[in-house]
Image: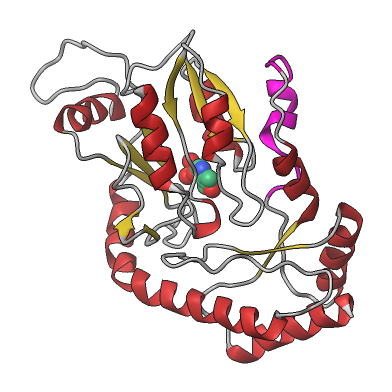
């Protein structure tokens, strides 16, 4: 909305992500153009994005999925070559970095979510935008509260209610002081999984890139049948697990009217992925227990 993107415009975004990524594009009236992902990072494939640029493409919306930064070097080059805006979906990646730069600090905008499942969760719904551009910041402030400007009652823009309420903000101010510590604990859990699960047959572990903030620890199985069977096995052992995401976005009924997207890796990932518990409060013994259960299934 701040960038004036709307009907007739196209915005590139990954197909393998949470729905809100594409939803935010569609709600402006623009068309989401679905891009395939890299199987090893789960993140947008910039080469495929390049092949899908048209005269109508206005922006690219990379997601830093599961807490790992997308390849912002390749995405930056692509955006520059085609004069595209970059909007980073950093909802899952508070505290993550790309070559030392914090996510949300590289695009025209970065969008963060404080939904309770994120690394920094509110007591309910909350979110935040970042930008280094003063004019865009001013536009965002205008739109966040129904187009209201201080002391001016006439409206130049139609906004909405996109406010972060004060109660959530107060809670987040206290919690955020511990974010680095929580990410360090997540990173420790991920490292323990990496060493204990290395070499497990039929199990592909996530790439441990520098700057990962480990919102999710997502493994891959050879196919949907094995993946669903491991999920059921863990449930029986009362070990929490979740499939993020069982379907790619180009497969959603609400996008059936769009041209075919051709995202074979996104479809493959939807068949293979399973996220294991990695939350900061997990004990070493709990990580070991999950590991034993996974190893017993894969043996
Ligand atoms: C959680 C999430 C969002 C949306 O966050 P809300 O706070 O629910 O609006 C957007 N994108 C991704 C990738 C997410 O995981």
Compared with residue 72, is residue 225 higher up or lower down, i.e. above or below? Answer: below
Residue 85 visible in image: no
Residue at (78, 55) in percent of width and height:
272
Q: How many marks?
A: 0
From the viewer's perspective, tell me whether residue 297 is left or right of residue 163: right
Locate the C terminus by quadrant.
Answer: bottom right
Residue 263 visible in image: yes
Residue 294 painted magenta? no
Span shown in magenta: 245-259
Of the pair 160 and 279, the residue shown nearer to us: 279
Locate the N terminus by quadrant.
Answer: top left
Of the pair 124 and 88, the residue shown nearer to us: 88
Of the pair 166 and 207, the residue shown nearer to us: 207
Give coordinates of residue 57: x percent, y percent: 46, 18
Compared with residue 178, is residue 37 higher up or lower down, i.e. above or below? Answer: above
Give coordinates of residue 179: x percent, y percent: 36, 69
Give coordinates of residue 136: x percent, y percent: 22, 28
From the viewer's perspective, tell me whether residue 195 is left or right of residue 82: right
From the viewer's perspective, tell me whether residue 14 is left or right of residue 271: left
Residue at (70, 80) in percent of width and height:
198
């Amino acid at each position: 909305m701040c960038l004036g993107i709307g009907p007739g415009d196209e915005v590139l975004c990954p197909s393998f992500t949470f729905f809100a990524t594409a939803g935010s594009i569609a709600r402006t009236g623009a068309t989401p153009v679905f891009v395939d992902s890299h199987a090893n990072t789960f993140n947008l494939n910039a080469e495929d994005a390049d092949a899908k640029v048209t005269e109508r493409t206005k922006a690219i919306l990379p997601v830093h999925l599961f807490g790992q930064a997308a390849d912002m070097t390749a995405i930056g080059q692509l955006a520059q070559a085609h004069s595209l805006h970059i909007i980073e979906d950093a909802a899952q990646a508070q505290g993550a970095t790309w070559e030392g730069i914090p996510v949300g600090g590289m695009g025209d905008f970065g969008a963060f979510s404080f939904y309770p499942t994120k690394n920094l969760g509110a007591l309910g719904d909350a979110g935040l935008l970042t930008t280094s551009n003063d004019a865009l910041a001013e536009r965002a402030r205008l739109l966040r509260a129904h187009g209201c400007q201080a002391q001016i009652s006439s409206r130049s823009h139609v906004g909405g209610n996109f406010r972060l309420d004060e109660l959530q903000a107060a809670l987040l101010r206290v919690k955020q002081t511990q974010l680095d510590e929580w990410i360090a604990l997540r990173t420790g859990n991920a490292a323990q999984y990496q060493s204990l699960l290395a070499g497990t047959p039929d199990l592909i572990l996530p790439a441990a890139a520098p700057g990962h903030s480990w919102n999710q620890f997502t493994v891959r199985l050879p196919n949907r049948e094995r993946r669903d069977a491991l999920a059921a096995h863990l449930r029986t052992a009362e070990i929490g697990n979740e499939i993020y995401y069982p379907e790619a976005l180009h497969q959603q009924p609400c996008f059936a009217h769009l041209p075919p997207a051709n995202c074979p890796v996104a479809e493959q990932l939807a068949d293979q992925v399973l996220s294991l518990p990695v939350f900061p409060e997990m004990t070493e013994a709990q990580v070991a227990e999950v590991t034993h259960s996974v190893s017993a299934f894969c043996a």
